[in-house]
């Protein structure tokens, strides 16, 4: 195994978040009853013609600018001809020789913290097909054309990835990017973001690529990882036992965790691509590009770099906090409230308590039960020492479940930290008085018992004693305090 | 008699309430009833709808509304989708197809108050030059019913020549308006590619197809084009350019007009045909025009170029006829492949199959460059030849066809001989240019056509040149015996 090098390239299909389809006015919303979102153009009726959705072009250009690619001043739609019941026209309109985006790249952070640049060969616009339905239908196949004509951006990488983990890291980065750009909702369950993986192996040191297999339609990061791992093992085993990898299309079965042959190269269609005469070449001029450029948000890498610099965060923290636009915005809203000097505190809370609560309840950050202002309110009480960090976690849980501001919960539950020295001293005195043996032991050198007294005082105050103050006062009372 | 009047004359009588649209419609319907059985010019007749539409036009006229086509009957080629009316495209494949919408051409003419009498017979999917490939049987030429009327718009041409309607729509992909116009002695106009919307016109070869009209005079063609022409957002290849007033342009004198004689068209031209063209030139010089010879060196490539480009596009355009959603479906398909093979095998006729196979072949991997790409290059050279010619002359002139109408059955089994019928007309389609064919005399008692071709969007100039010729001659007033 260690003598083999893995070579992976991904073709990612990102469904563009347009309101209507790429060549018709039908809506693209997910989940409507079959064939209720397909008009005569989507159905491929005689005489109808496609008209390009300009929003889809803008989105493709936006992606191209974000990956620092060449945006083609002239790109051409072609017809990919094949027969299938869910392909109404008998051809798919796609881009072939002249795609709208070419030669870009993306930086991906790997597990070991290293940064790798993955080349993006091209990204082109195309229409999705419909889907065939078999469930609950006897002896017939149902066709649902709601999805037919949905705009897709197919993003084709160079064969630059060397492990399943790298492939997943790249795919996640693209996923982050398209959502940042607001050109794709990234919903993998609904098929808005999916990929095909081209996988091959070669002996280490060999320059020539091995024969590749293409694994189709992977719609989760986990499946991408597992499918590639399975496929790599299969190819290595095959070659090592004297066999040969054949160029073919394979399907990943997530139930059995294996890939299976779908069709070989010989069985592959001759798609007979040619320029679609119903559509003019897409001509893009500088003002168009400039207008799209003006809509570019701060990109994930830019945001991470800014977070690291302005808030003195580690590269890791900055990367996590910029992983989505919404998370970044939440974090920044908290910083605005609490001040950049407390950025590390804010980062820990957003990445810690907040993220676990969101994950636990499967809630998007936009719908967080604790909004940035409320979290800021909580952090303020930590900063001004009204409560300790430990109590703050309790308060946060209450805020999450009750939806009330931190102060209200602190008051209602009486969680305010005790900072009155006299009050703390009183408690200390009674604890000391109640534990003469431990006091004696401590004074005879058992330093460890200091913690015992802290615990007792905290217990007696319900954890509300200001820890710093408590330490100070306790030290005075215990240590040689007898002389005082 | 009413049926010998031109559109302008009919419109005047309708406006002055000397006749009603219902009377006019009844007149043509009764002629159709009496004369069509000998011609087979129709696939569908719509008398009830016609009388309703005529009554509606009369109601508009009664309010004082006027319009050049208000209340005028017409015939649509059965390639145009007509809402609620069978639209067969001359094929068994669509024998059961009732279009759910109006083509833009149909909608515009309907809006202008025209009255549809029916849908005309045509070569199957507009593939043919004799109207013999129709599923509904050949159309006969009213000048001699043993002869073909030309094709593919043979029904519209024969019906216009037989005075079964004041005008009829057609489509021209390689000569399908001009060639049958010539062979039946009527005026046939093919506008510039992009001048008239293709939306709702069942596609044969998308980059060549253009809607046009059959009339009995250039003046009538100007009036009809005025309504048909103009931008349509539903056709991306439809040009957003202002539509000039074509009728107004008809008065301009021809003094100084430079007419080019296409050397390639006259080489080997049958002497009697050549003599008619010479006569026409004499008329034109008498009207003040100047003639000079021009050459289009690549024009001889036009037939082979066309028979690569058109089949390539049609092989893809006709893929949607698969028996799944509309049109013909074979009985009891045993599986998907059987459904495809028999639905298409039984639904398409021989000529359509020949072109689908040719087109599939020229687009196939390994042949694409040698055929399709080479044909595209040749097409560009032919277009460049025309462009160069139009730097020297305003219009070019020549015969529309090499011979007058031929016998039904004479060429149907020899596709190459049949294809050569379009030798003079195909060039304009490849270059996207407007062309008009007007009657210019007789050979063996059969009408011959004079073809004028102009630069892109020169319809006004073209129609004026045709109109001036018709002011000086009366060839266009001749009616076939029995149809006067």
Image (spheres, helix red, strand yellow):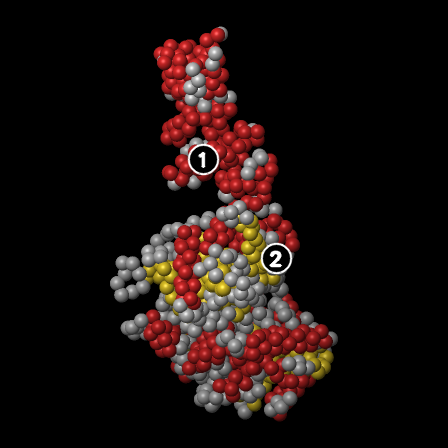
The answer as to whether the residues below labels 1 and 2 share one chain is yes
Residue at the (64%, 87%) spot, across then down: B266
Q: Disc 1 on helix, strand or loop?
A: helix
The tag on residue A313 is none
Q: Which quadrant, please, contains the N terminus of chain A? A: bottom left
Structural crowding at the residue carrying mark 2, measured as other residues with C-alpha within 10 Å and reported as few (<14), some (14–19) or many (≥20): some
Q: Nearer the viewer, residue B119 or A128?
A: A128
Please name the residue shown 46% across and 77% down the image: B356
Find the residue positioned furthest to the left.
A138
- Depth order, front residue of A19/B475: A19
- Sequence order check, earlier mark of 1 and 2: 2
**Front disc: 1 or 2:** 1
Q: Looking at the picture, how far across and down is residue B141, in whole percent?
A: 47, 84
**Looking at the picture, how far across and down is residue B195, in whole percent?**
57, 67
**The quarter of the displayed image where residue A256 is located:** bottom left
Location of mark 2 (residue): A70
- Identified at 66% across, 82% down, the residue is B297
Residue A447, quarter of the rendered image: top left
Instruction: Give coordinates of residue B60: x percent, y percent.
Output: 47, 60
Q: Secondary structure at mark 2?
A: strand
Q: Quadrant of residue B133?
A: bottom left
- Is A5 or B16 nearer to us in this picture? A5
Q: Are the residues flagged by discs 1 and 2 in contact, CB closer than 8 Å?
A: no
- Mark 1 and mark 2: span between their CA atoms? 40 Å
Q: Which residue is denoted by mark 1 in the rendering?
A: A352
Whether residue B353 is visible, yes or no, is yes
Marked residue chain, label 1: A
Q: Indicate the chain on which mark 2 is placed.
A: A
Q: Is residue B211 visible?
A: no
């Amino acid at each position: 195994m260690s003598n083999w090098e893995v070579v992976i390239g991904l073709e990612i299909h990102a469904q563009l978040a347009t309101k209507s389809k790429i060549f018709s006015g039908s809506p693209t919303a997910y989940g409507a009853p079959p064939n209720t979102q397909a008009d005569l153009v989507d159905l491929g009726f005689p005489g109808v013609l496609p008209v390009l959705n300009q929003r889809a072009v803008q989105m493709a250009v936006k992606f191209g600018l974000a990956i620092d690619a060449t945006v083609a001043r002239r790109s051409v739609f072609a017809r990919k001809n094949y027969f299938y019941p869910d392909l109404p026209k008998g051809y798919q309109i796609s881009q072939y020789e002249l795609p709208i985006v070419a030669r870009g790249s993306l930086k991906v952070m790997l597990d070991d913290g290293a940064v790798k640049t993955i080349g993006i060969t091209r990204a082109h616009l195309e229409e999705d097909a419909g889907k065939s339905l078999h469930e609950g239908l006897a002896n017939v196949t149902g066709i649902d054309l709601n999805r037919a004509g949905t705009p897709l951006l197919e993003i084709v990488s160079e064969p630059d990835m060397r492990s399943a983990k790298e492939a997943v890291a790249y795919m996640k980065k693209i996923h982050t990017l398209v959502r940042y750009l607001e050109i794709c909702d990234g919903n993998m369950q609904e098929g808005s973001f999916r990929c095909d993986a081209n996988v091959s192996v070669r002996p280490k040191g060999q320059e020539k690529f091995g024969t590749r297999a293409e694994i189709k339609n992977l719609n989760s990061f986990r499946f991408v990882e597992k499918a590639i791992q399975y496929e790599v093992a299969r190819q290595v085993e095959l070659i090592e036992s004297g066999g040969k990898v054949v160029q073919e299309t394979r399907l990943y079965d997530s139930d059995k965790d294996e890939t299976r042959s779908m069709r070989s190269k010989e069985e592959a269609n001759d798609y007979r691509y040619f320029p679609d005469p119903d559509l003019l070449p897409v001509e893009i001029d500088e003002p168009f590009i400039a207008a799209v450029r003006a809509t570019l948000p701060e990109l994930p890498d830019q945001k991470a770099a800014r977070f690291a610099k302005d808030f003195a965060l580690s590269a890791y923290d900055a990367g996590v906090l910029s992983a989505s636009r919404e998370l970044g915005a939440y974090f920044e809203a908290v910083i605005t409230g609490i001040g950049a000097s407390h950025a590390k505190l804010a980062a820990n809370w957003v990445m810690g308590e907040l993220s676990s609560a969101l994950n636990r309840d499967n809630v998007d950050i936009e719908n967080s039960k604790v909004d940035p202002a409320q979290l800021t309110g909580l952090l303020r009480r930590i900063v001004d020492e009204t409560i300790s960090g430990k109590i703050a976690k309790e308060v946060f849980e209450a805020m999450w479940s009750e939806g009330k501001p931190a102060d209200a919960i602190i008051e209602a539950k009486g969680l305010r930290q005790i900072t009155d020295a006299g009050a703390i001293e009183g408690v200390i005195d009674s604890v000391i008085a109640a534990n003469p043996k431990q006091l004696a032991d401590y004074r005879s050198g058992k330093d460890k018992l200091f913690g015992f007294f802290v615990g007792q005082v905290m217990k007696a105050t319900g954890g509300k004693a200001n820890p710093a103050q408590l330490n100070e006062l306790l030290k005075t009372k215990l240590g040689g305090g007898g002389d005082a | 008699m009413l049926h010998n009047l031109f559109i302008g004359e009919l419109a005047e009588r309708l406006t002055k309430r000397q006749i009603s649209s219902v009377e006019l419609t009844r007149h043509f319907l009764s002629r159709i009833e009496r004369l069509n059985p000998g011609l087979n010019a129709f696939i569908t007749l719509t008398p009830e709808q016609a009388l309703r539409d005529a009554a509606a036009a009369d109601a508009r006229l009664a309010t004082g509304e006027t319009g050049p086509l208000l209340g005028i009957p017409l015939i649509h080629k059965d390639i145009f989708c007509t809402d609620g009316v069978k639209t067969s495209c001359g094929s068994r494949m669509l024998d059961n197809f009732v279009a759910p919408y109006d083509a833009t051409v149909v909608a515009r003419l309907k809006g202008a108050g025209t009255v549809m009498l029916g849908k005309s017979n045509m070569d199957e999917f507009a593939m043919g030059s004799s109207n013999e490939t129709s599923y509904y049987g050949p159309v006969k030429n009213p000048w001699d019913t043993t002869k073909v009327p030309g094709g593919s718009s043979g029904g519209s041409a024969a019906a216009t020549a037989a005075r079964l309607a004041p005008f009829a729509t057609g489509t021209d992909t390689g000569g399908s308006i001009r060639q049958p116009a010539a062979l039946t002695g009527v005026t046939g106009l093919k506008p510039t590619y992009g001048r008239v919307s293709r939306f709702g016109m069942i596609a044969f070869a998308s980059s060549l197809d253009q809607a046009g009209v059959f009339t009995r005079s250039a003046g009538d063609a100007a009036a009809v084009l005025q309504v048909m022409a103009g931008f349509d957002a539903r056709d991306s290849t439809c040009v957003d350019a202002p539509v000039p007033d074509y009728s107004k342009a008809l008065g301009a004198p021809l003094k100084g007009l430079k007419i080019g004689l296409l050397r390639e068209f006259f080489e080997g031209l049958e002497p009697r045909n050549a003599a008619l063209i010479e006569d026409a030139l004499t008329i034109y010089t008498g009207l003040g025009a100047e003639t000079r010879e021009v050459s289009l060196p690549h024009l001889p490539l036009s037939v082979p170029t066309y028979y690569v480009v058109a089949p390539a596009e049609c092989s893809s355009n006709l893929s949607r006829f698969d028996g799944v959603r509309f049109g013909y479906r074979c009985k009891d398909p045993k599986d998907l492949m059987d459904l495809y093979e028999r639905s298409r095998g039984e639904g398409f006729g021989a000529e359509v199959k020949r072109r689908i196979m040719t087109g599939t072949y020229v687009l196939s991997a390994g042949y694409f460059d040698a055929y399709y790409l080479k044909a595209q290059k040749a097409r560009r050279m032919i277009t460049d030849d025309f462009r160069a010619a139009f730097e020297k002359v305003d219009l070019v002139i020549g015969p529309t066809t090499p011979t007058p109408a031929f016998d039904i059955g004479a060429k149907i089994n020899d596709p190459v001989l049949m294809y050569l019928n379009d030798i003079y007309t195909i060039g304009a389609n490849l270059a996207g240019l407007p062309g008009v064919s007007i009657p210019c005399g007789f050979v063996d008692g059969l009408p011959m056509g004079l073809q004028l071709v102009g630069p892109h969007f020169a319809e006004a100039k073209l129609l004026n040149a045709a109109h001036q010729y018709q002011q000086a001659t009366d060839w266009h007033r001749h009616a076939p015996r029995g149809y006067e």
